[in-house]
Amino acid sequence: MLKELHKITSDPDKSFDQKVQQLLALGCRMFSQQHGIVSCIEGNVYTVKHVVSDDAGLQPGLQFEVANTYCVHTLSAGHAMAYSHVANSPVAVHPCYATFQLESYIGVSIQVKGQLYGTLNFSSAQPKVDQFTEADIDFINLFAQWIGIEIGRLQDQQQLERRFELQQQMEQLADIGCWEVDCVSNTLYWSTQTRVIHEVPDDYVPDLDSAIAFYPEGEDRDKIVEVVDRAMREGTSWDIEIRLQTYTGKLKWVATRGRAIMENGVCVRIIGAFQDVDAQVNTRNALIEKKNEAQRLLIARSQMIGKVSHELRTPINGITGMLQTLVGENNPDIIESRVAIALRSADLLVRLVNDVLDYSKVEAGELELETVRFSPKHIFDDLYSLYHPLCDNKNIELDFRVSLPEGITVSGDPGRLTQVFSNLLNNAIKFTAEGGVKLTAKIKQEADNAFLQVGIIDSGIGMNERTQANLFVPFKQGSASISTKYGGSGLGLAIVKELCDKFNAELRVKSSEGIGTQVHVNIPLILAQSDVTETTEDYVAPQNTSFDALNILIVDDNDINRLVMESLLSQLSINADYAVNGLEAVKSVQREQNKKPYNLIFMDCEMPVMGGIEATLAIRQSQRNTGKTFIVAMTADTSDANRRACLKAGMDGFMTKPVKLEDVRALLKKVAFPEMNAFQRDNA
């Protein structure tokens, strides 16, 4: 039935009237009824609009009182009504039964744009053999809904056609929103629509002196005065869009057209027309602005692609170039030197990729902060260890003056804080050739609030005012010479600004060209509740460590990734088993469960057959009553959503690709020596 309904309603070659006739015929067959009617109801008058019936006297245009039809019950109920045998129902006393002896009926109201239009109903002089069903009610509701929508569409189409006709009349200076100036008697006439456009009271009397005041002083008033004066002098016409301020103070755009009527070279009358085009002009201006914005975005995106492409080539060239020169090289010192260059290039490549990913998150509004407990002091210890060798290589001083209370812990996102200070330090060191970089850090407490106040001061090249104005704009790096000499994507400080906004932090920059730059960050922190039972000790690895007790499984569908992990583990004298998808991993875990269970699994997330998250869920399900296996995500997807999904599935850690040897070694120590460094699962 639905297929036949769709066939009727979607036929492009049939008119609305033809489709309604077919629907009524379909309904008569479906409901086993003699008469199918679409009515229009106005007040208490029921008018037949469309009909299919074996009664020749039942024709379109026939009218009844609504109260004398079964439809009055449908309208009263507010939903579809059906009677299979009227004689056995309360409706048997209705005048319609007495007059027409209709024994069965099903009907529903037709709504057009939320208003009652009429009814769709089917009736018959014979009782219906079987009862009307819920499916019958659903079908008649569907019929009525389509009819109501189509009637509304036709009404809109007719209205659009009327508007088009009115527009043509306006173009011919028809009597819609018209006005006339009698230059002989100095009188002004406004039509009703012109009064509506000007939003004047009913008793308002327009005159020549006050009419000009409806145009705002300045460009709009000067423009209308100019075209009217020229028309009066030369007998010309005009057609302009201009702003008009209505009697109520509303500013709107109108299209005004007019021409002067001359007699013997003298203007005796001016006739014209108004059209309210405020919505059209605003829409057009909005579209123009959107077009301009789209063009700006396309230019920015093109610049971004070009910039990133250029910046990617430098580290890739360093990696591929050094690897090519290693082929056939036997000198250990040369090999070590070139591998170091390749590794530095790889670090630069990872930093650039991370910046682009973070900027993409910023653009998509997906940059999120985590809340975990941590010690701020550890952030600055790590930063000093990271950047001190770089400063030594440049022969500049790195001065850290960190004054933080012993044992203080806070709640926040240490990773993003590290990113803020790392980007700022990286910039300071990059642009400093002599002197040094100084970092100061302290915590200022005010009642229950705490603020981490960090200053980074360098003696580098500094910035002029123009560069400072674009400091946090993506892909902006001052002059072309700066970008050429120092490189970089121009994303680091833009990300710093976004992160500071996320932290509700204050970020201030002061710089002088040729002297240096000062950056001050004031970040609100949440002090963690003290826990007297908790002790924190720095982990000291044993002098002679062994990972012999570890049974490790590497799960990754990529041959190169598995080879990388095999090479890294071989440097630690560790062998591992390998699986190419999650299903193989689950089978391997089950196979080894009663032999030598895996106590560490490196799990890729995106794999064919079965992904890492699904595999982790399956492994955790099978290990409910057995020993613990640590599962660590090993993925290139660094998004917060992916991290949360991994941890929710039961993974214990999150390691991003490219994987570094020191990260693998640190993780192995946590698993192999839990009594000395408890493995703590990351917070989701």
Image: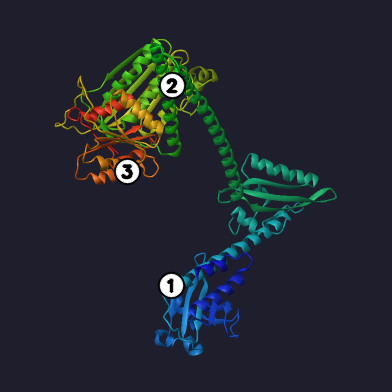
Determine which of the numbered discs, if any, sits on residue 135 in the image. Answer: 1
Q: Amino acid at mark 3?
A: Ala
Name the spot of residue 359 as percent of width and height, x first.
44, 33
Residue at image point 16% right, 31% down = 534
Name the spot of residue 100 as percent of width and height, x first.
51, 88
Residue at image point 46% right, 14% down = 461
Q: Nearer the viewer, residue 286 or 545?
A: 545
Q: Is residue 163 above or below residue 151?
A: above
Name the spot of residue 595 as percent of width and height, x first.
21, 38
Residue at image point 41% right, 31% down = 560
Q: Nearer the viewer, residue 620 or 384?
A: 620
Mark 1 or 2, nearer chain start: 1
Q: CA distance from mark 2 to mark 3?
A: 35 Å
Tell me how the rendering is colored. rainbow
431 sits to left or right of 655? right
- Circle 1 SS class: helix
Q: Quadrant of the C terminus?
A: top left
Q: CA distance from mark 1 to mark 2?
A: 70 Å
Mark 1 or 3, nearer chain start: 1
Q: Quadrant of residue 205?
A: bottom right
Labels 2, 3: front one: 3
Q: Is residue 675 above or below residue 273?
A: above
Task: Find disc 3 in the rendering and name its residue.
Answer: 615
Q: Amino acid at mark 2?
A: Ser
Task: Find disc 2 in the rendering and name its residue.
Answer: 345
Q: Is residue 664 above or below residue 633?
A: above
Q: Is residue 105 above or below residue 243?
A: below
